[in-house]
Image (cartoon, grey):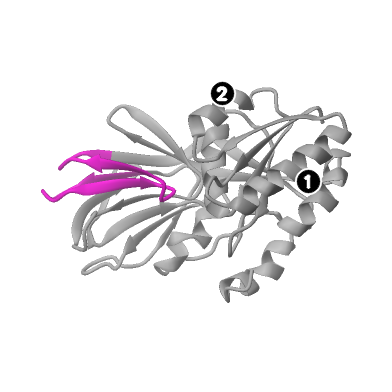
Amino acid sequence: MKRIGILYHPKLEKARGLVGELEKMLSTKKISCWHCSAWDEDEARAQIAGADLILSIGGDGTILHTARAIVPLSVPLMGINLGQLGFITELDADEALSKLPDVINGEGWFDDRAMLEAEVGGKSFHALNDVVLRSPIARLIQVKAKIDGEELTTYRADGVVVASATGSTGYCLAVGGPILYPQSNQIILMPISCHLGLDRALVLSPQSVVELSVADKGETMLSLDGQVNLSLKQEQTVTVKLSQYTTRFLRVHPPSYFYRSLWQKLKGKG
């Protein structure tokens, strides 16, 4: 490796300190690096080309920012966890300095994760976890849903989640959705607190195209990974499908580590 980028949580003092330590370690190995706030996706995107690895320092939320900044490049990403759960991070802060030299020397394997693409108003957006339609206030909304052009139902619910396998351990799980294995390409369609009708999650094929249309006059928000929020108008349609891009994680723990750590993290002891 010759060039590494570091994206960090800008409000964590510990993240800034770790950036400095990593830069010193990388300089001793003649590796150039740059760093910026993970929240400034445009600044990060301008520097990513040519990087051999991106380090994300924070928690799962920091990785979500980083993953969107990397699109459409396939630069490997490794998360260093300073948060709580860390479902998609790889190293704890105290492991970073000891294990990164082995990573630089070629240790590890690639974990490619499916992303979602949402199209609305002629624009496309990408998300690693989920695409959510919901009200900005506590009220039911009506959302017409189609799958592959066929009408499914009109949800009367607090909202609707379309999630990837990675997102299945996020908001989707919190509202009662299933957990998919990490490398799955399936798509989850899940209503939030459904009042009437179809209240179960559907697991869809990787080829499925989901159309969600706002069916009432109240304000509705489109949320991407819980971080990018757009206001939707009545009758406006959001089309969600599997993205042509993936997020490529660089891992050092074996693939079975996900299952070994799943229950521990769900108990809040990650």
Establish if 123 lies above or below 65. above
Looking at the image, which residue sits at the far left?
A: 217
Q: Residue at x 41, y 51 (%)?
A: 226
Mark 2: few/some/many CA within 10 Å (<14, 14-19, 20+): few
Q: Note whether 164 is above or below 198 in the view shown.
A: above
Classify residue 77 by image quadrant.
Answer: top right
Question: Which callout, 2 or 1, points to the residue nearer the camera?
Answer: 2
Q: Residue furthest bottom?
A: 267
Q: How far apart are labels 2 and 1 at the CA level?
A: 26 Å
- Say which of 227 and 217 sits in front: 227
In the image, is 133 to the left or to the right of 69? left
Circle number at residue 181: none
Residue 261: image x %, image y %? 68, 68
- The residue beneath circle 2 is 46
Tell me if residue 222 is in the magenta stretch.
yes
Residue found at x 61% / y 59%: 86
Q: Quadrant of the N terminus?
A: top right
Identified by mark 1, the residue type is Trp
The x, y position of residue 8, in whole percent, is 60, 44
Q: Which residues are magenta?
A: 210-237
Viewer-proximal residue, 16 or 234? 16
Of helix, strand and loop, which one carries label 1? Answer: strand
Q: Which residue is mark 1?
A: 109
Secondary structure category for the residue under label 2: helix
Q: Earlier in the sequence, mark 2 or mark 1?
A: 2
- Name which residue type carries label 2: Ala
Q: Considering only vertical position in the picture, is 257 above or below 216?
A: below
Residue 183 visible in the shown view? no
Queried whether the magenta region covers residue 39, the answer comes back as no
Residue 104, image x, y percentages: 84, 39
Left or right: 213 with respect to 127? left
* Observer-nearest of 40 and 182: 40
